[in-house]
Amino acid sequence: MPFFVQHADVLITTVGGLVACFYGLGPGRSVGSIPRQAKKLLSICGPLLLIFAALRFFTDQPPGIVWQRHLTADGIASAEFPGTPPAQQLIDSMNGVSAPRTSLVYNVPNKNISLFLSFSPLTPNDADIPIEDRVSVIKEHFTQLGFTIVDESPVEISGSSGFALELHTGDGKAHVWLRMAHIHGNVYRVVASSGGLHHADPIIPHFLESFRIE
């Protein structure tokens, strides 16, 4: 949620307080003809409104994040979420091949950030394909969607070989981070996506780095 919308009441109170101070405390300030008693009232109300606005701003902040670790449905992989992610069952299709995907998905309130922990089975034809080749298929898929590869590297995830990708659209408005590992015939992955002004939010690296194989 934009700052001005989230704190609209505080901003309105602040503007009211400044206007009251301007006409109540300013030398010779008047709107048409302000009676002396009204001017005195404005000189008292203006500072009070500013104090109230400051107190409201500093006490009406969102609560701190409480990270919670959640497991995939089979208990093999986990990641920490800043809230409770509902489960989803979807079918992925890529290059004519479909596979069921079980996901935990959390959309961060007031931020254009989505966090995914998911797994899906490898097809018999994919079981012996190196992870680098599977990553190449994923990269090709995102490239067709208009994404550019920003960074790619092999990573170790709880002692297992994995891979990490970072992508963004050409206009820089959307970013995607992915980490994946292949264990026990399944693909386990975490994905973080963001839009707007939240690409550098610390929620994203915390979530990605919390990914582990149990």
Image (cartoon, helix red, strand yellow):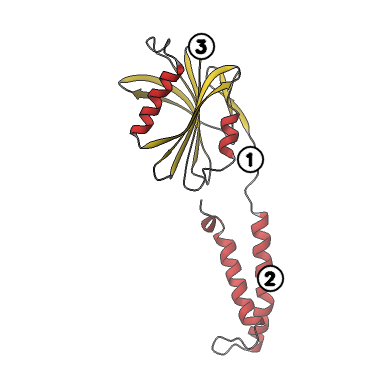
Q: Please indicate whether residue 141 sits to the left or right of residue 77 in the image.
A: left
- The answer to which image quadrant residue 65 occupies is top right
Identified at 58% across, 21% down, the residue is 157
Asked if labels 1 and 2 touch by Cβ distance under 8 angstroms, the answer is no
Q: Label 1, on which residue?
A: 65
Return the residue at label 2: 48
Percent x, y of residue 155: 55, 23
Residue 72's spot in the image, x, y percent?
53, 22
Along the line of sight, the residue nearer the viewer: 113 or 161: 161
User: Quick one: label 3 or label 1, which is nearer the N terminus?
Assistant: 1
Q: Which residue is mark 3?
A: 184
Q: Is residue 162 above or below residue 1?
A: above
Residue 139: quadrant of the picture: top left
Q: Are marks 3 and 1 in contact (CB under 8 Å)?
A: no
In the image, residue 20 above or below residue 64: below
Earlier residue among tags 3 and 2? 2
Q: Secondary structure at mark 2?
A: helix
Mark 3–mark 2 CB contact (< 8 Å): no
Whether 150 is drawn above or below 126: the answer is below
Nearest the camera: 48 or 132?
132
**Cα gap from disc 3 to disc 1, whole angstroms:** 33 Å
